[in-house]
Image: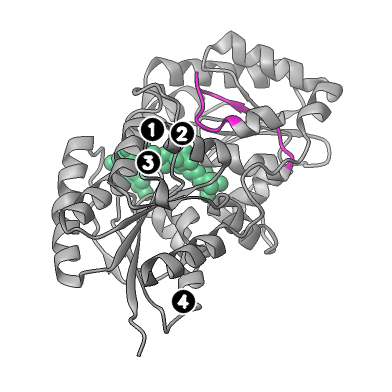
């Protein structure tokens, strides 16, 4: 009988769960080759639960590590302890981690301590500024150094790994699994949670949560949003606010009671993806949204100074504008012109064709058996 490989898919935050979800059914297609295991670290609690419901995932293992307003060091140490025990008990043949979160770093390190090969999904993204995004840029470098299999979403990401002399045997360009996930949900019917006159209003969708934007940059973003609704009577802003108290408290304090600014709870991925596709414009500091919006043909202004996703900028759908109030206003003003808006609202798909998870599983099938 052929050997069966225990592959454990790890996730802990909302974006990791979204981007790892398509891999689980893909691994399950080959029950003679893989025992597909999944582990939710619970780095996020409520926001993770929303995603698991949409993709109908019941994790094999749940670690429930989140505490309110957790510190990076506290979270990292809890994760390493819990994952170390789990890996010791289960002995997976391969652990798959995603991107650049604390969950990914802790899982890659704990797996390395057990000499378990790590597969890094979304490998090779870089800004080459160690504090932007913080701590994600450092996490990416470290996870890539710890990993055996590097699943780079694009040629640019693969080039970074080659340039850094990362072991070249398993650097594979796969596309980004976010497109697989988006294609799974965007076809499903969905009721949007807000009563808005979609025909006559321009909806601006906003998200902002990054650590380097906490404090003054977030205040400046809030001031820009206030000025936008004051300036444009046909604009409605929808802002699903991240549960991090460093985000939620200042945002509700500044924008909680302003006409045409709708602050909501974080939305289910199904609702959020439909909302993206119906929006006139998206303002965000999120990573994943920079990858999704181009394939929906919705312009994005990135509320950061740098991005690790240059492909969408090159494709013309995404512009990096920072967090300065006046700059945001000027960029929004430019896009109120239909010509400028049309020029950015071109559907582009630099992140793949929805088959990244199939490619990754095929590579694993070959690599683990060799
Ligand atoms: C984390 C990731 C970031 C990713 C983001 C996605 C790291 C270092 N950062 O940042 O890369 O972009 O997730 O959203 O891994 N909270 C809740 N309920 C939830 C989720 C969060 O209450 O469901 C609150 C808690 O108080 C928690 C805090 O948010 O302590 C921060 O969560 P954490 O995962 O540490 O940081 P994020 O800013 O969410
Ligand atoms: N998202 C969601 N509901 C929301 C906001 C975002 O489902 O209210 C999705 C979004 O479509 C994307 C992912 O969450 O797939 C991005 O997560 P986040 O911005 O938290 O993390 P990042 O991508 O910045 O790491």
Q: Is mark 3 within 8 Å of ligand 1?
A: yes
Q: Which residue is mark 4?
A: 28
Ligand 1 located in image quadrant: top left
Circle 1 residues within 10 Å: few <14, some 14–19, many ≥20: few
The reply to whether the magenta stretch includes residue 272 is no
Residue lying farthest to the top in this orientation? 326
Q: Which residue is mark 2?
A: 160
**Majority secondary structure of magenta residues:** loop
Of badges 1 and 3, nearer the viewer stands 1
> Residue visible at 28% across and 56% down?
41
69 above or below 128? below
Residue 332: x, y in percent? Answer: 69, 19
- Which image quarter: residue 341? top right
> Residue visible at 30% across and 55% down?
42
Residue 90: x, y in percent? Answer: 20, 71
- Image quadrant containing the N terminus: bottom left
- The alpha-carbon separation of the residues under discs 1 and 3 comes to 17 Å
């Amino acid at each position: 009988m052929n050997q069966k490989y225990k592959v454990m898919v790890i996730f802990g935050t909302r974006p990791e769960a979204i981007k790892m979800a398509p891999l689980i059914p893909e691994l399950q297609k080959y029950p003679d080759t893989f025992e597909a295991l999944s582990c939710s670290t619970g780095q996020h609690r409520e926001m993770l639960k929303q995603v698991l419901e949409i993709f109908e995932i019941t994790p094999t293992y749940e670690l429930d590590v989140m505490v309110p307003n957790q510190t990076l060091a506290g979270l990292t140490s809890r994760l390493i302890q819990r994952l170390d025990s789990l890996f010791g008990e289960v002995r997976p043949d391969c652990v798959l981690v995603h991107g650049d979160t604390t969950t990914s770093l802790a899982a890659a390190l704990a797996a390395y301590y057990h000499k378990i090969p790590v597969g890094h999904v979304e490998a090779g993204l870089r800004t080459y500024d160690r504090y932007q995004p913080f701590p994600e840029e450092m996490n990416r470098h470290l996870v890539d150094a710890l990993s055996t299999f590097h699943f780079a979403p694009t040629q640019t990401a693969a080039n970074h790994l080659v340039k850094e002399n990362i072991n070249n045997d398993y650097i594979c360009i796969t596309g980004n699994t976010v497109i697989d996930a988006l294609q799974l949900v965007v076809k499903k019917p969905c009721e949007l949670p807000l009563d808005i006159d979609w025909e006559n209003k321009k909806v601006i969708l906003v998200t902002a949560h990054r650590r380097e934007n906490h404090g003054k940059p977030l205040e400046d973003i809030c001031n820009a949003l206030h000025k936008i609704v004051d300036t444009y009577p046909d604009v409605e802003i929808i802002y699903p606010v991240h549960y991090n108290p460093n985000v939620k408290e200042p945002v509700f304090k500044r924008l909680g009671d302003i006409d045409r600014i709708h602050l909501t709870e974080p939305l289910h991925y199904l609702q959020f993806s439909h909302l993206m596709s119906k929006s006139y414009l998206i303002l965000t500091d999120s990573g994943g949204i920079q990858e999704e919006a181009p394939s929906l043909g919705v312009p994005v202004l990135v509320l950061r100074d740098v991005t690790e996703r240059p492909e969408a900028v090159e494709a013309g759908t995404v512009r990096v504008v920072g967090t300065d109030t006046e700059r945001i206003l000027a960029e929004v003003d430019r896009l109120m012109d239909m010509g400028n808006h049309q020029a950015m609202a071109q559907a582009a798909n630099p992140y793949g064709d929805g088959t990244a998870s199939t490619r990754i599983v095929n590579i694993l099938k070959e690599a683990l058996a060799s």
